[in-house]
Structures are given as C-alpha cells and as structure tokens.
Image (spheres, rainbow, N blue to C red):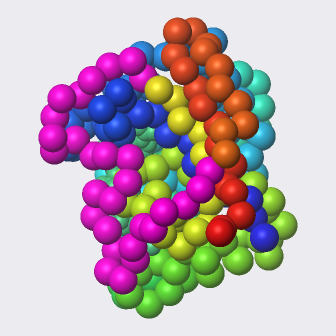
C-alpha cells in the first residue's frame, strides 16, 4: 500500500488559488525561502508526486525539488482523456513522468504523450482514472509514499475514496475574496462520490517564515 499525503496551500477563506483559473503559484510566492525549502523538502522525501490534469493545464508546474537538495520524485498525472498540453514543462524537461489515462484516451493522444522524453503512459480505468487501481500499480512498483498537491477535484476524489493518510496545509495569510476561486474540495465532484464526515488528528502545528503549517493524520473510521 502506498501512503498518500496531501500538501496544499490555502487562503484564509479556504481557496486553493486567488481566482477561478489562476495559478496557485501566486500563493507559493507568499512563502519565504525558509518555508519554500521546507515545502520542497517534503517533495524530496516522497517517492512520487501527483497533481490533477487541470493543475497541469492551469499552473504548468515542474513538480521538481528546488530550494533544497534532494531527489525528484516520480511525477504522476491522472488524465482520463490524456489531453494535457504537449508543451507542459513536466512533459518536456526529461524527468520521469507517468501519465495515467482511462481507456477512452485516443491512441493518437497516447502516442503523442509517449513520444515525450521519459514519459510513460498507463491505462487505469474506463470512464476516468481509477485512483485505487493507480495506487495499487504504484505500490506494485515499490513506491511507498506519494505527495498530492491538488487541485480541488483530485483531492475530493482521493478523500471521497478514503485514500489519504496525512494532510499538510500551509495557511497563507491572505483572503482571495473571489467566490469563483477553487475551494479546498469539490470543485468538480465526480459522479457517485460523496464526501462524508471524516476525523483527523492534528499532530503538528508550527509557524515558519510567518506562515502557519498544520499537519493531520487520519483517525480510524468510527
Ligand atoms: N493551493 C494549492 O496547494 C494548489 C495545488 C494544486 C492546484 N491548485 C489549484 O487548483 C486548481 C485546479 O483544480 P481543479 O479541481 O480544477 O483540477 P485538478 O484537481 O488539478 O484536476 C482534475 C482533473 O484530473 C483528471 N482526473 C482524472 N481522473 C480523475 C479522478 N478519478 N478524480 C479526479 N480527477 C481526475 C480530470 O481531468 P481529465 O479531463 O484530463 O480526465 C480532472 O478534471 C488550479 O487553480 C490550481 O492552481 C492549488
């Protein structure tokens, strides 16, 4: 079994980005170098790192380890149709990336992804990516820890399937004020998935570079 930790930056009003289609990199820029180094240290300790396909489309992240020395985790991107921008940084920098699609991804799309340097494509699910099956696949390859950085839709699916063991939240001291900005969970809830009450226990709370960080672990279901 692979251990999943979510790592998110949240505004005071619970948003993952300042506006509906704006990059979360704007929130990252509020961090001090000390906090950026801590944040990237979390990446360096993980075997793999995942964001949803929309985060790739909106943020164009590299998902590499910077600000601190350490190995880059394997990048894992669930995209049911595989339609990621072919100019995306993570498809072109030569680092290892695994794109998980569902069977509806066209052969042409899969071929275009596979033509990218060090990009692997696996089919995992029919209508959309089957996240538990993807986790089994990663575990079978010997990966033990996965960091998931968002966004809202992917996080909702993971929480909805009770796959998350640990939550890390960076509390960015800013209010977005935009009702359309993505909230922490359920931007585009997946059919049939509902988020019930779940219990979490805070294990750490600290302020680094003026920003609060809270860490929770999953309590056993009651
Ligand atoms: N503050 C932070 O820490 C943080 C971190 C990351 C992102 N963000 C922000 O979050 C926003 C993007 O969030 P989002 O909710 O639009 O998108 P998202 O969660 O990044 O990506 C969702 C997409 O992932 C693909 N997917 C495949 N299988 C899935 C499954 N089983 N469950 C869920 N998704 C699946 C789908 O795309 P396909 O159509 O390709 O299948 C789906 O539309 C951006 O504004 C970004 O800046 C913030």
Residue 171 on the magenta segment: no
Q: Tell me how many marks there are.
A: 0
Name the quadrant containing residue 194: bottom left
Residue drawn 61% across the image and 77% down it: 132
Q: Can residue 130 be seen in this snapshot?
A: yes
Residue 26 placement: quadrant: top left
Q: Position of residue 189 (x, y in %)?
A: 32, 68
Q: Position of residue 40 (x, y in %)?
A: 64, 30
Q: Name the quadrant of the C terminus.
A: bottom right
Residue, x 52% and y 16% (percent of image)? 211
Q: Is residue 142 left or right of residue 118?
A: right
Is 37 placed left or right of 195 in the picture?
A: right
Residue at (47, 78) in percent of width and height: 129
State which image quarter holds ligand 1: bottom left
What residue lies at 62% left-to-right and 60% top-to-bottom?
A: 164
Which quadrant, please, contains the N terminus? bottom right
Q: In front: 27, or 198? A: 198
Residue furthest to the front:
222
Residue 121 lies, in percent from the top left, at 55, 73
Residue 38: quarter of image: top right
Magenta span contains residue 196 = yes
**Residue 80 visible in the shown view:** no
Q: Report whether 186 appears left or right of 178.
A: right
The stretch in magenta equals 172-200
Dominant SS type (magenta)? loop
Q: Percent x, y for residue 160?
A: 48, 69
């Amino acid at each position: 079994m692979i251990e999943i930790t979510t790592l998110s930056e949240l505004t005071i009003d619970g948003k993952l980005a300042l506006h509906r289609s704006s990059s979360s990199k704007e929130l990252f820029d509020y961090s001090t170098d000390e906090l950026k180094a801590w944040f990237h240290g979390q990446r360096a300790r993980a075997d793999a790192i995942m964001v949803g396909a929309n985060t790739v489309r909106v943020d164009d992240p590299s998902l590499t380890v910077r600000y601190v020395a350490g190995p880059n985790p394997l990048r894992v991107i669930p995209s049911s149709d595989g339609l990621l921008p072919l100019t995306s940084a993570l498809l072109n920098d030569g680092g290892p990336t695994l794109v998980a699609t569902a069977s509806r991804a066209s052969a042409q799309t899969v071929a275009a992804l596979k033509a990218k340097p060090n990009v692997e494509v696996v089919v995992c699910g029919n209508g959309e990516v089957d996240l538990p099956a993807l986790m089994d696949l990663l575990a079978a390859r010997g990966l033990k820890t996965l960091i998931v950085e968002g966004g809202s839709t992917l996080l909702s699916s993971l929480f909805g399937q009770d796959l998350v063991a640990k939550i890390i939240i960076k509390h960015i001291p800013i209010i977005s004020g935009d009702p359309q900005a993505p909230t922490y969970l359920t931007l585009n809830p997946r059919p049939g998935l509902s988020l019930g009450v779940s219990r979490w226990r805070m294990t750490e709370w600290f302020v680094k570079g003026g920003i609060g960080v809270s860490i929770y672990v999953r309590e056993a279901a009651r």
